[in-house]
Image (cartoon, helix red, strand yellow):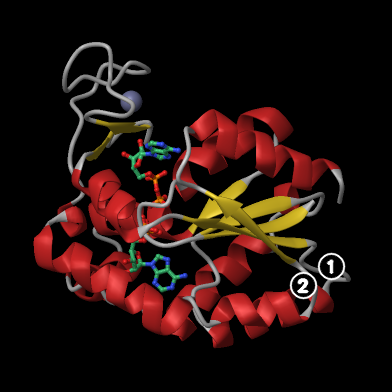
Amino acid sequence: MNVVLMGPPGAGKGTQAEIIRQHYSIPVIATGDMFREAVSQKTELGTKAKHYMDQGQLVPDEVTIGIVKERLAQPDCQDGFMLDGFPRTTPQAEALDQVLADTGRKIEAAINISVTEEVLIERIEGRVSCPDCKTIYHLNFNPASAEGICDECGASLTYRSDDRGDVAKKRLEVYLEQTLPLLEYYKEQGLLFNIDGNRPADEVFRDIKGILENL
Ligand code: ADP
Ligand code: ADP
Ligand code: ZN
């Protein structure tokens, strides 16, 4: 299955992608995670991306498309993949279709997790994650068993710097301006599936599973 997972910042894409990865053993390609990794490793890509991420802006299309293209060429993606947080602009979606067409593949579903703005803000404000194994927690909705410590690996949990006030607000604005219009792109092709994300993660997953099993 070749699937894209869409939704505003804080909708629960990363949380669902992790459940999907465990159920279906397909690779999850999360551009946000790739960029954060590059920033923490201080690579050339990280230096380029950091400037935009710190301001809540999108990293330029040519950079983002380049890393996804490279990742999709790897052997583990040939039998299916899930993209989390890509595409986020129309040029990214068009480039994705082109790259897949060149290798005889195509997107089979675009799953959009929609969540009200009020809930998004609560989710972003309470999000903490593990810098080592990347497990995502929420201070109220999905807390770690011992406060501040990752259940999986024992590392200290951290906030994302772009989840703070103004930057978080900017990310929501950028989503509405640049990513929301993209839903139409998939709708026109009959590939769009909307899911109500204002519910517990296991209920959201049940719906996603229903879609994936009918592909
Ligand atoms: P969110 O939790 O808001 O969905 P991500 O972890 O997916 O955030 O992305 C974090 C940041 O990484 C974004 O604000 C943006 O700067 C950058 N980024 C991630 N994916 C993309 C993309 N497809 N195009 C451009 N920039 C991206
Ligand atoms: P995204 O990748 O879309 O930005 P995340 O998966 O990181 O979103 O989720 C954002 C925050 O909301 C995290 O703290 C996560 O634990 C929490 N969360 C995710 N899904 C749900 C849900 N269905 N109900 C309550 N909290 C959730
Ligand atoms: Zn961990």
> What residue is shown at x 33% (from left), y 78% (from top)?
174
Disc 1 secondary structure class: loop
Q: Mark 2 points at which residue?
A: 100
Q: Measure the alpha-carbon separation of dots 2 and 1.
A: 5 Å
Question: Local crowd at mark 2 within 10 Å, few (<14), some, or many (≥20)?
Answer: some
Give the number of callouts: 2
Mark 2–mark 1 contact, CB under 8 Å? yes
Q: Whole-percent x and y of residue 32? A: 39, 58
Q: Is there any visible trace of residue 209 in the rendered image?
A: yes
> What residue is shown at x 49% (from left), y 74% (from top)?
88
> What residue is shown at x 37% (from left), y 31% (from top)?
133
The amino acid pointed to by label 1 is Arg
Is tag 2's residue or tag 1's residue first in the polypeptide sequence? Answer: 2
Disc 2 secondary structure class: helix
Q: Is there any visible trace of residue 60 in the rendered image?
A: no
Determine the residue located farthest toward the left in the rendered image. Answer: 165
Is ligand 1 closer than 8 angstroms to the Cβ of mark 1?
Answer: no
Observer-nearest of 4 and 131? 4
Instruction: Kindly identify which numbered label has been placed on residue 105.
Output: 1
Q: Whole-percent x and y of residue 193? A: 69, 60
